[in-house]
Image (cartoon, rainbow, N blue to C red):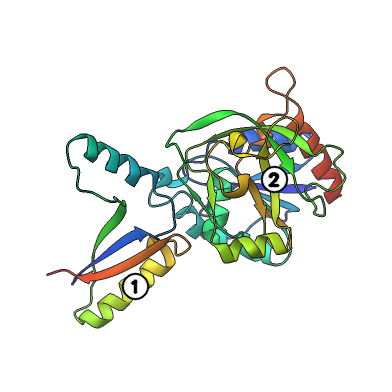
């Protein structure tokens, strides 16, 4: 299985993602933002970081990078595209997934482990996972998910919410909403479910001695789903 | 010619920075404020002498990059 991780100026989770993908069997290539063509890929990842210094709006400049036209075409033809953290911000700026990510409600950069609950397993990312609740890491300043009422209706009608912030038991409420996200939304799909954007970092949870293994469960399952 | 664009958050979008600025101003003694909303201001020198055309170009920029129309509105002003 082949994957590509796009590196933008200011990306800083691209190498972590490379390590995670390779650990679970992907043959990964790093792709520079100024390239024209994507290598042949089964999965494209937009990694976390601070592309273009978060100038203007997080992800706005990166969404206009040269490589992004190929990524958009790949997504529109059904290819799997996953955006993590800044990658999620880039995805919303391309319009591939609905909504926007605003500044965190209490104006703090948040860096901690959180629990998330998977809402829907009818998609290539979560299909066949045994668990519904995962512990992932978040580290962001602009993760406060927002969309218009019309968009929210469409998101719900099409079961596009990927994950919600929750407690370790899966309870979704204000107390376990780290950043003020609308309805505790931590990740979202496009209508077709081949594009996934989420704030939490599964690639930071792939080593028992360093963090946890919930990311390992996610990546192992993902490569099996793609095979 | 110089064209300016003012980008503001839409009414129903939370603006925590505006809120903090409001609280700080209030603490400084500026008591007669009902709300503060923070926005962005751009001055763009367009190589176009027809003001109508120049504004149209900047409008296109607002739609495609400068504003995110899910949460922001834009206003275009001809700068003397």
Residue A131, numbered label: none
Q: With respect to residue B2, does A52 lie above or below? A: above
Q: Chain of mark 2?
A: A
| Residue A137 falls in image quadrant | top right
Q: Are marks 2 and 1 on the same chain?
A: no
Q: Is residue A5 above or below residue A96?
A: above
Residue pointed to by mark 2? A163
Q: Quick one: B7 or A210, which is closer to the camera?
A: B7
Crowd band around label 1 with a 10 angstrom C-alpha radius: few (<14), some (14–19), many (20+):
some
Q: Which residue is mark 1?
A: B59
Left or right of A179 in this view: A118: right
Nearer to us in this view, A52 or B51: B51
Q: How many marks?
A: 2
Question: At x 22% / y 40%, what residue is drawn?
Answer: B25
- Residue A100 percent coordinates (x, y): 52, 54
State the residue lying farthest toward the left. Answer: B80
Residue drawn at x 23%, y 39% as measured from the top left: B26
- Give me the C-alpha separation between circle 2 and circle 1: 36 Å
In the figure, is residue B4 to the left or right of A143? left
* Residue A7 visible in the current orientation: no
Q: Position of residue B53 (x, y in %)?
A: 27, 81
Q: Secondary structure at mark 1?
A: helix
Q: Quadrant of residue A47?
A: top right
Q: Residue at x 26, y 59 (%)?
A: B42
Q: Using a 10 Å C-alpha cutoff, classify the residue at mark 2 as few (fewer than 14 neighbours), some (14 to 19) or many (20 or more).
A: many
The secondary element bearing badge 2 is classed as strand
In the image, A153 versus A39, the foreground residue is A153
């Amino acid at each position: 299985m082949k994957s590509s991780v796009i590196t933008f100026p200011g990306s800083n989770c691209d190498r972590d993602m490379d390590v995670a993908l390779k650990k679970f069997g992907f043959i990964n290539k790093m792709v520079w933002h100024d390239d024209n063509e994507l290598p042949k890929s089964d999965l494209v990842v937009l990694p976390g970081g601070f592309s273009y210094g978060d100038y203007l709006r997080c992800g706005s400049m990166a969404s206009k990078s040269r490589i992004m036209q190929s990524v958009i075409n790949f997504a529109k033809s059904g290819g799997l595209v996953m955006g993590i953290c800044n990658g999620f911000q880039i995805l919303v700026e391309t319009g591939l997934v609905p909504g926007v990510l605003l500044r965190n409600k209490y104006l703090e950069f948040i860096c901690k482990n959180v629990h998330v609950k998977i809402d829907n397993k009818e998609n290539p990312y979560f299909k066949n996972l045994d668990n519904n609740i995962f512990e992932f890491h978040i580290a962001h300043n602009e993760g406060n998910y927002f969309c218009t009422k019309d968009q929210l209706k469409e998101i719900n009608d099409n079961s596009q919410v990927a994950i919600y912030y929750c407690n370790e038991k899966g309870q979704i409420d204000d107390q376990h909403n780290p950043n003020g996200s609308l309805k505790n939304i931590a990740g979202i799909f496009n209508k077709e479910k081949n594009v996934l954007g989420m704030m939490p970092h599964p690639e930071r949870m792939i080593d028992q001695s360093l963090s946890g293994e919930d990311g390992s469960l996610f990546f192992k399952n993902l490569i099996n789903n793609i095979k | 010619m110089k064209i300016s664009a003012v980008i503001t958050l839409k009414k129903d979008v939370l603006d925590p920075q505006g809120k903090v600025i409001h609280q700080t101003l209030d603490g400084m003694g500026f008591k007669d404020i009902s709300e503060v909303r923070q926005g962005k201001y751009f001055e763009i020198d367009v190589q176009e002498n027809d003001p109508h055309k120049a504004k149209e170009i900047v409008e296109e920029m607002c739609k495609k990059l400068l504003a995110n129309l899910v949460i922001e509105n834009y206003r275009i002003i001809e700068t003397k």
